[in-house]
Amino acid sequence: MRDFIPARRTFLKSVGGAATFALLPAPLLLSGCQQGTAKTDAEESGLDEGPFDVELTLFARPDVTPILPGAASEVWRYTAKLIKGPDDTLIHSDDSYVGPLIRLRRGQRVRVHIENHLPEATTVHWHGLHLPPEVDGQPRFPIQPGATRTVGFLVDDRAGLYWYHPHPHGDDGGRVGFQSYAGLAGPLIIEDDHERELDLPNGNQELVMVLQDRNFAGENELTYLSDGMGSMMTRMQGFKGDYLLVNGKPAAVKKVSATAYRLRILNGSNARIYKLAWSDGRPVTVIGTGGGLLETPEERPYVALAPAQRVDLWVSFEGDPKGAEIQLINEPHRAGDMMDDGMMMGGMMGDSDNTSDKPTPLLTLAVVRPLLGRLSSDLDSLPQPDNTTKIRHFRLSMKMMRGFAINDRQFEGATVADDEVVSLGATEIWEFFNDTMMPHPMHVHGLQFMVVSRRNANARSARQLKAGIVDSGLHDTVLVLPGERVRIALTFKDFKGLYLYHCHNMEHEDKGMMRYYEVRK
Ligand code: C2O
Ligand code: CU
Ligand code: CU
């Protein structure tokens, strides 16, 4: 292992954290790291017969990486080793905690050996992918410390940006927020022939950006939850950090040619909703969402990106003079705040989360030389959902002192209620009604859905984000603003069994705003 692990450090400082966020003492963490190679048990699920086109080992382990200037920070991170497959399957990020970029092609048979070198149980969830339940990384299949789990699957999704992250949930709550915050998350790209024919910007003209926010204390130790009232609010609102990081680093300047670029952006934050815009006011050109390309590009004044969502942007610097600097910025907004209507809480308690009312640059693009770039208006065709009359209603509500609920229920492990059973092959409409004062990014595992309608948002939060919500295309996560009713159309194809649906505000999810649904024959 690394030989520069600092002698005295408190990993991921947490002041006054509740039991669910309790931290392990540093020595245990470090020994977990050193002895992690002992494989005490191995399990295999999904496709178990080759030949496989891609085979890799994914390690989850404690490490130390630089984030801010100065002392390096202790993190938990994914690293990977390619056993078999095309050379560009893995793009490592050695000096960042963000997991390697995994690049797969539609139709590939993939096998991943997941080794847990952490001091606690974890899982790896392939967010957005259409996979059988056993390889989906659900909390009911924990990988214990020192254990390995092998999953095999067929890549059957549209070309797009997906991601992978932990999904453990024990008796005393979820650990998704903590483990992701500690650094366990990485981007995953699926490519296909159709997309390649479109000749979108690639190579140096394709930028993958993982957006996350963090807090630091002392010598750059990551801190998760803070003290006192702030912490109560954090638990309700979800964690928001003061530092916005791009791929595990503070915002950077990048030299670009005066040509077209493709920016593929993942919101890997625990709870922050980004409002992304260009510093010079040019429209944001959206070409894709979490489920791949749109049918045709769309221009927006800005784009709202909720936790777990991805957006695919196209931008051209063709008309920009040499020396121009254009920034991708995050504009401040208060739509993620509790008591969004500005009554009580915000004023009374101060606002530890929205530290700045100024836009924060995430990436500065400095134009250096001209080239030509074009965008086709005909990107891709989308599958049309079957007609359906079945509407299932989900009311998102608050449980006093216990977080949030879906139809008054919280997570109960691998059980489903009668109204959480769907039929294999069926298409349904699900309506999420947000009966709370906070936005909830609702995520359904195992499939991509279409947003069919959105109505009745509470005026204030709608005004702040509405023009930037991209409902076209396919999605696995949809932002439901306070007061809104959002309907989605989903089809339950190919696989039977249990899948999760939940709010992807990780603190909400960890506190029980998550349920299983079951696909039955
Ligand atoms: Cu990003 Cu339940 O997942
Ligand atoms: Cu998921
Ligand atoms: Cu939520």
Image (cartoon, rainbow, N blue to C red):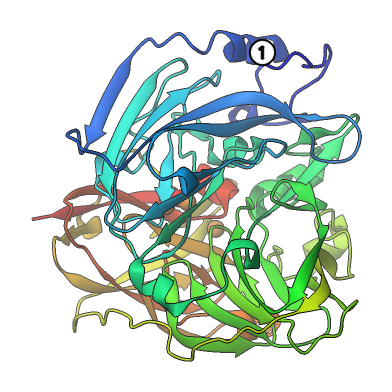
Query: x, y (%) of residue 240?
Result: 73, 52
The residue closer to the viewer here, 410 or 506, is 506
- Label 1 belongs to which residue? 30
Secondary structure, mark 1, is helix
Q: Is residue 135 visible?
A: yes
Disc 1 CB within 8 Å of nearest ligand 1 atom: no
Quadrant holding the N terminus: top right
Mark 1 Cα-neighbour bin, 10 Å: few <14, some 14–19, many ≥20: some
Dividing the picture into quadrants, the one containing residue 431 is bottom left
Q: Is residue 482 above or below residue 211?
A: below
Q: Is residue 512 above or below residue 65?
A: below
Q: Residue at x 44, y 79 (%)?
A: 198
Q: Is residue 94 above or below residue 345?
A: above
Query: x, y (%) of residue 362?
Result: 78, 63
The residue closer to the viewer here, 139 or 299, is 299
Q: Residue at x 79, y 16 (%)?
A: 4
How many numbered marks does the figure carry? 1
Q: Residue at x 75, y 88 (%)?
A: 282
Image-based side of 72 in relation to 401, left or right: right
- View extreme (left): residue: 521
Query: x, y (%) of residue 170?
Result: 45, 30
Residue type, numbered disc 1:
Leu
Query: x, y (%) of residue 473?
Result: 42, 78
The residue closer to the viewer here, 345 or 411, is 411
Dividing the picture into quadrants, the one containing residue 65 is top right
Q: Is residue 341 visible?
A: no
Quadrant holding the C terminus: bottom left
Image-based side of 309 in relation to 96, left or right: left
